[in-house]
Image (spheres, helix red, strand yellow):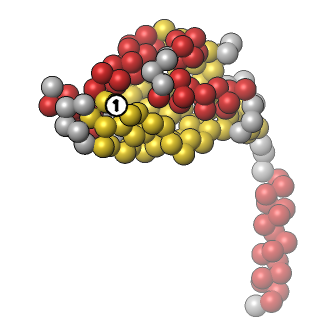
Amino acid sequence: MKKILFIFLLTIPTLTFCQKSAGLLSQVDDFSVIAQELDADYASNEHTLWDKTLSDDAVVYGNNSKMDGKTVKEIFKSHHTMFNDIQILDGYAHTNYFKDGNVWTNKWFIWQGTGNKTGVRYSNRCHFDYRWENGKIVEMLIFADNTALNMELAAQ
């Protein structure tokens, strides 16, 4: 049994060392920092950084519904007409620099807001992915529960 454990312990580092790297990952690069700054831009209802960073013709999938960047920016702005006290909490981002040249930032956070019509305080865990080209988001994936949005739209 000791021999098997010893062989196992020697094999794991060797296998890990022999694996090929797909690229680099960073939490402190410019894209990760911008991804975090987008939260404050959205929550404060400024949208200046979103307007500058998200390409109008970006391909965006929100829970598999395809849109363009211009439409998404308008949707984000409309949230402030349906909700108040919007906050983005516990934000985390890292950027993947792949060997094939693709650059993707992965972002997790909790969205909170109070419905203007229902008065309900909503909390929603979200995940966004951003693909970057020339300092712009050209592709975006959004994974979030639409319950709060649907309830507020139904109450209008």
Judging by the rendered image, the residue that carries numbered circle 1 is 84
**Is residue 109 or residue 21 the one in the foreground?**
109
Q: Is residue 156 above or below residue 70?
A: below
**Is residue 38 or residue 14 the one in the foreground?**
38
Residue in the image at 66% along x and 38% along y:
94
Question: Residue farthest to the left?
Answer: 155
Q: Is residue 17 above or below residue 50?
A: below
Q: Position of residue 102 (x, y in %)?
A: 67, 25
Q: Position of residue 151 (x, y in %)?
A: 20, 36
Residue 89 is left or right of residue 30, and the answer is: left
Q: Is residue 145 above or below residue 57?
A: below
Q: Quadrant of residue 8?
A: bottom right
Amino acid at circle 1: Asn
Q: Secondary structure at mark 1?
A: strand
**Is residue 153 or residue 85 the one in the foreground?**
85
Residue 64 is at least partly visible in this image = no
Residue in the image at 42% along x and 26% along y:
61
Residue in the image at 53% along x and 23% along y:
41
Residue in the image at 82% along x and 86% along y:
3
